[in-house]
Image (spheres, helix red, strand yellow):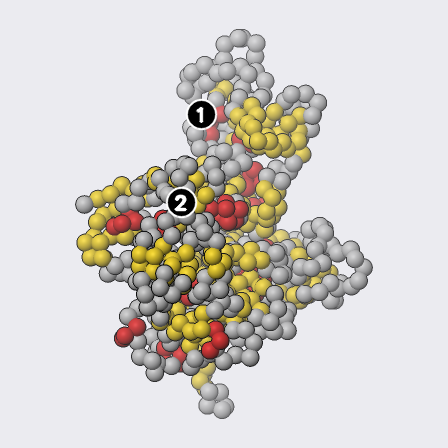
Amino acid sequence: MELQHWRHWQHPLVFNEDERSGDLCWGCCEPVFGPSYSCIESDCDDYYYHHKSCAELPLGLHHPSHPNHPLILFDIKTYRDNHEEFDKFSKCDVCGEKSLEYTYCCYRCNFNIHINCSSLSLTIQTEVHDHQLTRSIWRLLNFTCDFCGKEGNLPYFCFQCDFTIHSRYAACPRRLKVFRHNHPLHLTPSLEVHQSDSPICLLCVRKVDTLCLYYCSRCDFAAHLYCAMLYGNREFINLQELKEEQSTESKTEDPELHQSFDSRICKVKKTTVEEDGTEIATEIKHFSHAHDLKLTDGIPNNTKCNGCVQSILSPFYSCTPCSFFLHKSCSKLPKIKRHPLDQHPLTLSYEQASFYCVGCEQTWNGLKYSCQICNFDYHVQCILLSDTLTHPCHEHHLYLSKTNHRQKCSSCNSESYFVFCCSTCEFVLDFKCATLPQTTWYNQHEHPFTLCYTPEDDSGKYYCDICEEERDPKQWFYYCTECSFPAHCNCIPGDLEICKVIKTSVGEDGTKTVTKIKHFSHRHNLKLTNEIPKNKKCNGCVQSILSPFYSCTQCSFFLHKSCSELPKIKRHPLDQHPLTLSYPQASFYCVGCEQTCNGLKYSCQKCNFDYHVQCILLSDTLTHACHEHHLYLSKTNHRQKCSSCNSESYFVFHCSTCEFVLDFKCATLPQTTWYNQHEHPFTLCYTLEDDSGEYYCDICEEERDPKQWFYYCAECSFPAHHDCILGKTPNVKKQI
């Protein structure tokens, strides 16, 4: 039996009479056992498990809690990267909590009700009370919960005891298990908890201010009722089979999960014995590199570890011909590892292309840990942080906090689901800031930079000496004390991950030229090349190759020198947030020129927008050969028609003197290009080649619009549509 589900239209969901995986349901976010639907296609990015009842929910609903309008079913997870929309639609008007479960919504009134709240039973028998509880008949009544002490609006009543309780807490079990703790937690009145001050929930690191909580008296571990019940925290296991005497140490001391040298990851080729009898591995074969790596003493400047992508520190292994470096500590990382960020075991792998880390919400390459079940990737630096952090930026201990709402970092003001919180004060630190290196290098500077948390002086004016833009005095920065050189955190470490210099040469005039590089977009080293190949495109910007450029001849991979020097982080008027450079294998849609592209792209992680590098290389003021006046970037909430191609776009360049408009698609057309079946280059033309009155394309032999641009070979008097020269997808290079 199959079901075509609205949430996963690509494949039908297949019915399973008795699912036993325990994976979370996409609908209610609770484990799936028994009758269910899921996707079984091998090329799908997820299984999309659904309880049978959740998969068969009606798309529309008339509900007594909101009788005026019908409610529409939708998935709040589609808004996870849009903070404003997520906050607007994730909070249920019945239970008052935020959740990732499916929600019924009235868009007219901004009314939301979780699917679990929409189907509450009229009467229930619970573990938290001895008598049967009865729900109000879908009337929102203000009350104070006798279980948590908080106000609510949809209670369950016990008429025998005059007892009222929130509907969400009526389902609380007397005992449960959370991933962050090895022992079961017991439902306990707060007054019975033996702590000098108000108990601290060790899941969200906030004070527990409810009448009851979940508590382990053996370890003094406390948790909010809601936090312990949260699907990302609660571990659904048979508590009868859990041995109470199991210690925290016994769970973590798994020989399969933690080894000095995991033989599946790293093999020792040569060793040496020190005078004190200590055996040291001097040569290893690590799965991340094709060649053997040798233990090295000399620390190279401006070089990063290929594993953790941090500045190289001793001891480390290296492959000199490939300029590959690996910290000794990174070589000993286990293949399988557990971490509080994820409820499942994580597997180590090596990603040459970029990936997105769920922990710090940044793009990385190098070693990563992945959850095969959740399809989440984590940078190793995030996984190397434990759930308790001591950081020089703050005087108190910080504790990992996982909630279903974003918390603002006290350092950078970014908002994240995973942060470290101080239980003493309101200080919050996200993973991005927690993993910033204390000392690092910048390619164009001879001294190291140190991470600073307070301004370098009391001048009141603070600037970055790299981008020359103003610095927020409340935010961290890097500082070279030798040169009194301050810089934004994003301006210092960003470029080093993109390109490494492998070899240089010095000319007769003393000019230093980089002749070989290792760029993150390609697995091999790239050499500086002089001879320009015909009909070849740059793999970065997907424009015809021009000198100077780097190449890998065995892979037919080409990269303009200018593309190799693009920064990792860049700001542009097209987007209000910083943009991050990456190199996806697949094609993507550029918001600027509204075309399908591949190659290098800049992405906004917050808006989930992608931009082709050619669009980002255009500033907000444009001088173009097609027009005599300066053109200025215009962003409006309505589309404007391009004077060249007649297409309409939100982002265009506008002339303030006349009515001329140019969209990004036309603004990024190459001035000179090649056509595969022609021996001469073609030049972009804006006016007609003659006054004959009849104009045709010599490729497709169809008529040309005399008002539109075209490409022309002057040697052969050969005109052509630009679509015929460049193709329907000019910003897509076919991969070999």
* Residue lying furthest front: 160
Q: CA distance from mark 2 to mark 1?
A: 59 Å
Residue drawn at x 36%, y 61% is 159
Residue drawn at x 44%, y 85% is 279
| Residue highlighted by disc 2 | 65
Q: Position of residue 591 (x, y in %)?
A: 51, 37
Residues 434 and 281: in front is 434
**Res. 534 in view:** no
Give the vertical position of 257 relative to 226 (above or below): below
Q: Residues within 10 Å of mark 1 (few under 14, many from 20)?
A: some
Give the vertical position of 16 relative to 729 (above or below): below
Q: Residues within 10 Å of mark 2 (few under 14, many from 20)?
A: some
Q: Judging from the image, what secondary structure is the residue with disc 2 in? A: loop
- Tell me which label, 2 or 1, sits earlier in the chain: 2
Residues 168 and 77: in front is 168
Q: Position of residue 554 (x, y in %)?
A: 42, 49
Q: Quadrant of residue 348?
A: bottom left
Residue 724 disc label: 1
Q: Nearer the viewer, mark 2 or mark 1?
A: 2
Q: Quadrant of residue 241?
A: bottom left
**Left or right placement of residue 237 versus residue 604 in this view:** left
Q: Amino acid at mark 2?
A: Ser
Q: Split into 4 quadrants, where in the image is the C terminus?
A: top left
Residues 283 and 486: in front is 486
* Residue lying furthest right: 459
Q: Amino acid at mark 1?
A: Cys
Give the vertical position of 626 relative to 108 (above or below): above
Q: Position of residue 452 (x, y in %)?
A: 68, 65
